[in-house]
Image (cartoon, helix red, strand yellow):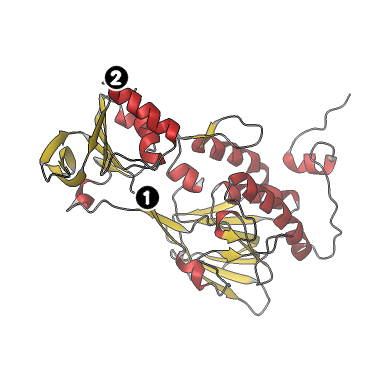
Amino acid sequence: MTESLLQPPLQTDAVIVGAGPVGLFAVFELGLNDIKCHLVDILDKPGGQCAELYPEKPIYDIPAVPICTGAELTERLLEQIKPFNPTFHFGQMAVSLVRQESGRWLLTTDMGTQIDAQLVIIAAGGGSFMPKRPPIKDIEAYEGVSVFYAVRKRDIFRDKRIVIAGGGDSALDWALNLQPLAQRVTLVHRRDDFRAAPDSVGKMRALVAEGQMDLKIGTFTAINGAEGQAHSITLVDDAKNASEILCDSILAFYGLTMKLGPVAEFGLQLHENLIPVNTQDFETGTPTIFAIGDINTYPGKMKLILSGFHEAALMAKKAFAYVHPDRRYRFQYTTSSSDLQGKLGVEKETT
């Protein structure tokens, strides 16, 4: 539902632009510091890129969690922040940010939602992202029916003849993951050379050698079908010979186009479409605006989820000073602080 501009702005301590893993964890760290949050995300659900592009793809580098999917990580983060009751505004893009006379910020979305906040935390990952479409005539007519750019539910591909187009990690990973599920998987790439992890390429070639999946080298030039349902694709090899590959579904992994979007118009200093921050508290050059996660840049930056979690923790300490200037910051451990445990709704263990 569109929120009318005639309604008074929503009031909160902090507005977080982006509800990916880092934005969600920021809710936790801010909540421990008695800072209330609203989150705005262009997607229709939390989780950011993890939930949108890799909901069932394994993640191996979350501390103390040997393996989890993007969807599982999102679910666990949502469970973790329940005590702080954040407000989400999904399916909305933050389009303007204005400093008010009070010194607070007024953020407006493309749906007309206005949020009045003391702090702004930009956790927008790489910004708004869109999959790159293959240069195929009328491909839009097949999208969402038989052409997909991400795997959100594996079961919709069960017993299907699947063409996977691309030569990077996403294409190889899903070729391997869907092969046991599908009737047949055919990997299509313009050359017999891949940008994916060597282990994945080796496993793919082993399956092809065993006759358990197909590899076709050539250029994907057309989709053949009707009313959105593909029945084959046309492939042209280096000798200009055309052939048809029968299929029910097409997964195209041609990469993503990352766009910073309206955040670029927020008046922040940018460096190669990233937001420079200091490494003490990840504040930008504009006081009370922070940037955490893949959207920021600083010397030695590593684009890892765990790095964003660290940034969120230090950001929250500085945020406390802005929101509660009359209170002294006390560093506490959740394992021993009855105050923090009370906020989390857990009882302190007694011996």
Cα–Cα span, label 2 and label 1: 29 Å
Q: Nearer the viewer, mark 2 or mark 1?
A: 2
Residue sitting nearer the eye, 272 or 314 = 272
**Closer to the N terminus: mark 2 or mark 1?**
2
Left or right, 144 with respect to 295, comes to left
Residue at which label 2 appears: 210
Confirm whether residue 226 shows in the render. Answer: no
Residue at 57% across, 56% down: 123
Residue sitting nearer the eye, 146 or 136 = 136
* Label 1: which secondary element: loop
Label 1 crowd (10 A; few <14 / some 14-19 / many >=20): some
Q: In the orientation shown, which residue stands out farthest toward the top?
A: 210
Q: x, y percentage for residue 331?
A: 84, 50
Q: x, y percentage for residue 287?
A: 69, 71
Q: x, y percentage for residue 242?
A: 11, 42
**Could you say which quadrant of the image residue 249 lies in?**
top left
Label 2 crowd (10 A; few <14 / some 14-19 / many >=20): few
Query: Measured along the vertical axis of the image, is residue 10 above or below residue 185?
Result: below
Residue at 33% across, 40% down: 193
Q: x, y percentage for residue 209?
A: 29, 22
Residue at which label 1 appears: 255
* Label 2: which secondary element: loop
Residue at 58% across, 52% down: 87
Confirm whether residue 326 shows in the render. Answer: yes
Question: What kind of residue is marked 2?
Answer: Glu
Question: What kind of residue is marked 1?
Answer: Gly
**Could you say which quadrant of the image residue 218 lies in?**
top left
